[in-house]
Image (cartoon, rainbow, N blue to C red):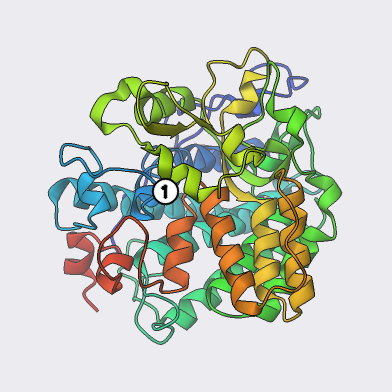
Amino acid sequence: MKYKFLFITASILTVSLSSCTKWLDVQPKTNISERVLFEDEQGFKDALNGIYVKMASTSLYAREMTMATMDVLAQQYDVSGNTHAYYEFGKYNYANAGVQARLDQIWNNAYSTIANINNLLANIESKKSVFSEGYYELIKGEALGLRAFLHFDLFRAYGPTPTVGMQEKSIPYIDVFEMKVKPNLITSDYVQRCLQDLDEAIALLSIHKNVNYGVADPFKSHTRNHMNYWAANALKARIALYVGDKATALQSARVVIDNTTLFPFIQRSNLAGTAPNRTFLSEQLFGIYVPTLKNINDGLFRESSGSSVLTNKEAFITTLFEGSSTDFRQVFLWKTDGTTSQRYPIKYLTDDIQTDVLNTKRVPLIRLSEVYYIAAEASNDLTQKVNYLNVVRANRGIGSLTSSLTESQVTLEIFKEYQKEFYQEGQLFFYYKRNNTLRISGYGQDMTTKEYVLPRPNDEIEFNNQ
């Protein structure tokens, strides 16, 4: 396994600790030596914040792994014009040089970020004495949770389809900081490594269950922008469902569902006025702060972006939302310029936001609604399945499903919820892959492993051809 290593620290804590927003204002600043970086608690904090900054790069969660490439692969947008920047992505033409370069960037930057995490973890045990109470557990727990998170997303993108490939070779799981080729693990072993990291993270983070917003310590000030106890449990539910362990998926989902007062559902009133909360911030268990999100949004979704704007046809959106005039996700998260039959998503639009602009710079990575969908899919009780779905529907402004639905009807309703809920978040393609869906609306051919398994970089194949 080859990867580049670069530690990034952040320009934080240069002002009074009373500031509750400074942790969010992180920008890459400089490279500093490992010895200096890990000499005290602040160095570990800076190192971890630098990891979050790397995750917020455009090749990862600020664009390609959420609102752009992954959503295009799920046929979320109309990219049928052959001059569209994402045209070849929509055709799953991974041999195209532009597509291959973009996919290589995702792979390389994700593993580079993992290398940073491994370096932090390699140093933390010998420096345990430098931490004030609770910070060793907090920083190590976050790092382990992030390592599991990044590895699992790499697996979802570049690993085999889980319904047919649990005993196939997957990709490397890198949990040490060293420049050696690592083996491609059997899928079941790879997933187990994710869960081992995650279980340790959950145990360490269990002493930090508060969901903070604006406390004195900037490092603890924005829980939702850190990997945290609740997000780690939701991630465990996501992983367990992905590989078919429904009992564990339901058990982990219930940890969050039983404490939903910490993550209240958005209300209709929160989506109007001078500070519309279109990213559903209160429902975010974990998200990434992206200071350049406005520019990214304008470049991808504004009608002024020309032929490469990511939009979809009016008729497609109307059908998707089943003609609903009350569904929050249609009423408040889509817009048209009035001159075309195309509509564009506005989850990250800030033009009409006059206050609380800081909270618009968040890209959700795990949200409360997904936990309910996981519980609905994992439960063996048909009535309970419907109830879980109805909780979300009630908080999206649409009517309840009848309790007389059959199992197949409930499965269809879960699928429709994934289609509606996760626009600009990159989750739908992974839903299709997890279920080995044969046909994706918008693509005229059957889906196979050729489409579902993203190709590894050529140099990775050359140096790690197992």
Front residue (pair 465, 72): 72
Front residue (pair 220, 354): 354
Front residue (pair 61, 181): 61
Q: Give the quarter of the image for residue 16.
A: top right
* Residue 174 visible in rendering: no
Badge 1 amino acid: Met
* Residue 448 visible in rendering: yes
Front residue (pair 377, 1): 377
Q: Which residue is mark 1?
A: 65
| x and y, in percent, of residue 441 in the image | 37, 59
| x and y, in percent, of residue 136 in the image | 71, 51
Query: Residue most toward the bottom?
Result: 167
Q: Residues within 10 Å of mark 1 (few under 14, many from 20)?
A: many
Q: Give the quarter of the image for residue 355.
A: top right
Residue plotted at (69% across, 23% down): 272
| x and y, in percent, of residue 112 in the image | 38, 50
Task: Find numbered disc 1 in the image and state the secondary structure of the residue it sits on.
Answer: loop
In the picture, measured across the screen, residue 369 lies left or right of residue 419, that is right
Residue plotted at (51% across, 43% down): 51
Residue plotted at (67% across, 53% down): 369
The C terminus sits in image quarter: bottom left
